Image (cartoon, rainbow, N blue to C red):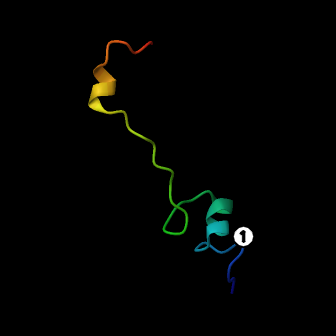
Amino acid sequence: MNTMGKGDKKSKRGKIINGTYGARRKRKIKKQPTLQEKISPDKKK
């Protein structure tokens, strides 16, 4: 039985090793542009 470590699927370290997300390892939230930022004419492309 694994308790806390690289092979533990429920620990943060185990999530990092497996490349998965969950309650112990949240995803980063990207800041969504506001509607005003989307339609502003002074935005360079």
**Where residue 2 appears, x then y in whole percent?**
69, 82
Q: Residue furthest right?
A: 6
Where's residue 1, x and y in %?
Answer: 69, 87
- Residue 37 drawn at (x, y percent): 33, 26
Q: Considering depth in this image, is 31 or 26 the residue closer to the camera? A: 31
Question: What residue is at 54 percent from the left and 69 percent from the top?
Answer: 24
- Say which residue appears at 50% left-offset and 54% top-offset: 27
| Residue 3 versus residue 6 in the image, above or below | below
Q: For mark 1, what is the residue?
A: 6
Whether residue 6 sits left or right of residue 39 in the image: it is right
Q: Quadrant of the C terminus?
A: top left
- As helix, strand or loop, the secondary structure at mark 1 comes to loop
- Amino acid type, residue under disc 1 in the picture: Lys
Q: Is residue 20 above or below residue 29?
A: below
32 or 18, which is in the foreground?
32
Is residue 24 left or right of 3 when viewed as pictured? Answer: left
